[in-house]
Image (cartoon, rainbow, N blue to C red):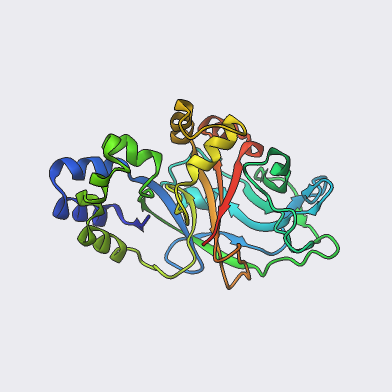
Amino acid sequence: MTHAPADALHELAHRLLSPDDAARWLGMLAPGLRLAHAGDGPPAGRLGGLPELPADTPWPVWEGNGPLSHIASLDCAALAAAGDVGLSLPGSGTLLFFLFDGRLDDEDPLVDPADPETRQGSQVVYVPAGTATHPHPAPDGLRPYPEVPLTAQAGLTVPADDAPSVRAAFGEVVGSRDWRRHPVNARAFDAALRALDPDPRGARHRVGGHAMPVQGAVEWEIAGTLLGPGTSWQDPRLADEAAGLVLLAQIDTDHEADMMWGDVGTLYWLIRPSDLEAGRFEEARFTWQCC
């Protein structure tokens, strides 16, 4: 689940893995952007603060429950300038992420990806470049999160052990007893991989690439939601749906922004590539995990 420069990952794979395993492992890596509080990359957006919305765009709400909190605003042009994000994002404009986070009613109800009736509790809004906007005042009683600027850093991302791309690369051995003894799961390889992370203790915000799950690959959760309640884990459609999803953004617990998702958890928004290319950001699906 590391985010690191391509040359470092290639050197590591060829040094510690067989040529065949190195080729398989490198083939499943995906470009993405790490969002950090400070760094060498250009400004990419911010956490928290008041969202910049057009005058005719109301603050997002979950009907019957209340207003959503503004989580992040990301500058699409700045993301594109930072490097390969691995997504067909618009070349300009702003993506705004909102979530009903339970602060107004003691965390009840929660946005549950398995419950379609809670879907309105998470919304992604796209504002095209050139649109006249203004900082929208927060609804009564909803305290904005502290504003924290973000910079973007390009690199390659490594999938979680149970991600769909891992099974596609290494086959049915994934998840078996033999998989636990496979060279890509060896202590030496894992330790060397983690050592490449430039900020292993920092908040892990990301756009594109592979998600960094807390409790297992998030693609399976979203795929089950898209296929409908009650979808069996043995349903052959599940793997295809999971493999077809891409990470739009993940927002980690962040103490500077006063964001705590459950017990040090992470928020995730995934989307089908066809919806992304068509600009249907309302089709982005949300899930979250915590310890």
Q: Which residue corresponds to the image point at 13% horizontal and 46% vertical from the top-left?
A: 18
Query: Can residue 266 be seen by looking at this rendering?
Result: yes
Considering depth in this image, is 112 or 176 the residue closer to the camera?
Answer: 176
Q: Nearer the viewer, residue 93 or 210?
A: 210
Q: Quick check: 205 left or right of 65?
A: left
Q: State the image quarter where residue 143 is shown.
A: bottom right
Q: Residue at x 54, y 42 (%)?
A: 270
Q: Is residue 120 left or right of residue 240?
A: right
Viewer-proximal residue among 268 and 217: 217
Q: How far across and how far down the image is residue 103, in percent?
A: 74, 63
Residue found at the very far front of the displayed protein: 177
Quadrant where the image shows the N terminus: bottom left
Question: Farthest residue in the bottom direction?
Answer: 256
| Left or right of 187, for residue 98 | right
Determine the image quadrant of residue 39: bottom left
Residue 271 at least partly seen? no
Image point (79%, 64%), residue name:
142
From this view, report whether residue 18 is shown above or below residue 279: below
Look at the picture and state if 52 lies above or below 164: below
